[in-house]
Amino acid sequence: MENEPDHENVEQSLCAKTSEEELNKSFNLEASLSKFSYIDMDKELEFKNDLIDDKEFDIPQVDTPPTLESILNETDDEDESFILEDPTLLNIDTIDSHSYDTSSVASSDSGDRTNLKRKKKLPDSFSLHGSVMRHSLLKGISAQIVSAADKVDAGLPTAIAVSSLIAVGTSHGLALIFDQNQALRLCLGSTSVGGQYGAISALSINNDCSRLLCGFAKGQITMWDLASGKLLRSITDAHPPGTAILHIKFTDDPTLAICNDSGGSVFELTFKRVMGVRTCESRCLFSGSKGEVCCIEPLHSKPELKDHPITQFSLLAMASLTKILVIGLKPSLKVWMTFPYGRMDPSSVPLLAWHFVAVQNYVNPMLAFCRGDVVHFLLVKRDESGAIHVTKQKHLHLYYDLINFTWINSRTVVLLDSVEKLHVIDRQTQEELETVEISEVQLVYNSSHFKSLATGGNVSQALALVGEKACYQSISSYGGQIFYLGTKSVYVMMLRSWRERVDHLLKQDCLTEALALAWSFHEGKAKAVVGLSGDASKRKAIVADRMVEILFHYADRALKKCPDQGKIQVMEQHFQDMVPVIVDYCLLLQRKDLLFSQMYDKLSENSVAKGVFLECLEPYILSDKLVGITPQVMKDLIVHFQDKKLMENVEALIVHMDITSLDIQQVVLMCWENRLYDAMIYVYNRGMNEFISPMEKLFRVIAPPLNAGKTLTDEQVVMGNKLLVYISCCLAGRAYPLGDIPEDLVPLVKNQVFEFLIRLHSAEASPEEEIYPYIRTLLHFDTREFLNVLALTFEDFKNDKQAVEYQQRIVDILLKHA
């Protein structure tokens, strides 16, 4: 028995299994496009964050699974089909919290064609996510496809398969094999064989890239050694004659492959070598006589998952025109799941795609099934008894008809609709990240093979109708990249790295959007993230460094693009649009050092920009989000508002700022001259830990007129009221005008205030001054409110022996001298 692959040629293989390190190297596709890259993006599966809706619906399991024959003999009841759907799952998470409250791709009416005209506009995904996908023409391969058609009559391209090599099949039966440098390494087959077998209709490369299977339009199958270019097998009797090969696929076992023909049947091919003779045994898994299968997908596991408990079953998914089946080929043939999906648009193409994902920290395969405008996700798990269970996950409801579904990684999928637009979708949130028009590819369709035109067109009407939009063999994915086969070209698409996405926005002169996107990477809220590894702090640091570079560029542009110097209002508007962005991101990044040094110095080159910068700080200061400011900026800030006659704003700012670095006496003088009494008190208290001087200053103003029996001015009344409130705050341990006095200072402040109130004489007292001037002044100013203040403090200090003594002293003074 042969144990494929044949190791006699492995050492000479041009495409020996690439190491993990080599697979992760990225080749430049944008310059000469001389290489295609091998970024294994699935290495970046964010398992812990990859949460899926907890509401799972088990597809009914049976003690004795049905046989394939019993399934074939089932009657499909079109009017009463089994729809596996939970109504509560229809609209879960349809709004993405990071999409600025715009509608998600998935919406409750999205499948209703009558509602298409009144649909909400989709989010502007470019401004939110940037350009997520990078698409490039593989010039070398494309040129050689055209050249081969002209020079060796290769015909037009018909099928593509990608591994660490790219194989392109042609309409005249040739298989062109290209390496990673886009160099043509092999031309397999001949036009004479092509004349006999017809076009290549399907291709498959095995896991270690040592074998290629070619399926033909007239039903034949060939196997090639990709190291030597040697034909190993020509198989003509694997399935009924007169039908085209629609799909041929290696399993993870190199001795086992699956093929699907235009009769809708599925066959297992077992490759053996006995006494040096290579043979192929065929077994029918599914007969197309009862509902043709038009899509097959074996489960492939990556090397790091080769020991996963499910891989031993060699699972195969098949989609007929009415149902999905998941069967195990090993250890013996067994049906694990059937899913009738009911009535569908008969022209829609059934699609299947496997991927390993993490649900609740367990990695398991997930099967995506699509037909029309709905994608179902089926999670496959193995229980402790060894049985396989399939559970339904949150489905995706779209507004377009699908013709291809590709996983890029466990979270990001790429969908191709029937008008050849690509939709990049975040699977968890169902948010559409980007839409890309690919009509320029001129995608190859497999319609003629589904209609089996090479063998006389003896296929069912239903299969022929599906074939109109079938492009199964024109799209191949490998290592997080998707390859599209056009009539004269090959294109590759892959996720841009996070840095590429930011830089792409910068090239479009979208600096604000670039900063917003970078911030979403910094906060871990971005979608389809590639290229950020390490722990969270390391990722944040990398992104923050890039954001700082952009901010410098942004500041330079703000100054450079400043409008006509003479139009002050226009200049102000320009800087009001741009400068707050710099302030916002510097503070978000906690880079006050950058904000108040380089950024401030740079913007200070323009007086208008400087003023706008200073005004931008106000809301942050008032909301206590910005406390520490350099002395120079704080001084400039106060002067700026002074110059603009905005003294109320100055007072509001001072009482929220750390003013210890300022010239205290100068600020006190300014506050006093401009009647900013709250600010003056704040500066004394916070700047000098001085609580008595503010009271003395206020008393000096209101005491003389009161003692002379004069009516106070409005300004003096305001000062008297502030004095009462200030005394109340000090005795209650509260800072004035807001906050609290530091706990260690509360007893000291309280005692100082009491001692001040009961002083026999004021400093600089005249001979005529009556004793206890401060208590008398407050009684004359507002007897009721002063007594209220005392009453409240008496209540608060019942357990404070020192305070009770002061209170008793004040009561005695009031009784004897008031």
Image (cartoon, rainbow, N blue to C red):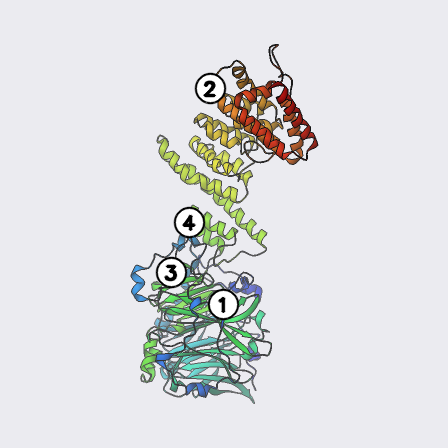
Q: Amino acid at mark 2?
A: Thr
Q: Nearer the viewer, mark 2 or mark 4?
A: 2
**Left or right position of 240 against 768:** left
Residue under label 1: 55
Q: Amino acid at mark 4?
A: Lys
Question: Mark 4 or mark 3, which is nearer the start of the sequence?
Answer: 3
Instruction: Identify the residue at image location x=42%, y=40%.
Output: 578
Question: Mark 3 or mark 2, which is nearer the start of the sequence?
Answer: 3
Q: Nearer the viewer, mark 1 or mark 3?
A: 1
Q: Nearer the viewer, mark 2 or mark 3?
A: 2
Q: Amino acid at mark 1?
A: Lys
- State which quadrant residue 594 falls in: top right
- State which quadrant residue 273 falls in: bottom right
Residue under label 4: 507
Question: Secondary structure beneath disc 3?
Answer: strand
Between residue 463 and residue 322, name the one nearer to us. 322
Label 2, label 3: how many angstroms apart (C-alpha)?
A: 73 Å
Q: Amino acid at mark 3?
A: Val
Q: Are marks 1 and 3 in contact (CB under 8 Å)?
A: no
Label 1, label 3: how many angstroms apart (C-alpha)?
A: 33 Å
Q: Nearer the viewer, mark 1 or mark 4?
A: 1
Instruction: Identify the residue at image location x=44%, y=81%.
Output: 259
Question: Secondary structure beneath disc 1?
Answer: loop
Q: Nearer the viewer, mark 1 or mark 2?
A: 2
- Which mark, by number, is residue 444? none
Q: Are marks 2 and 3 in contact (CB under 8 Å)?
A: no
Residue under label 3: 436
Q: Are marks 3 and 4 in contact (CB under 8 Å)?
A: no
Q: Residue 655, how many percent across, how many down? A: 53, 32
The total number of labels drawn is 4
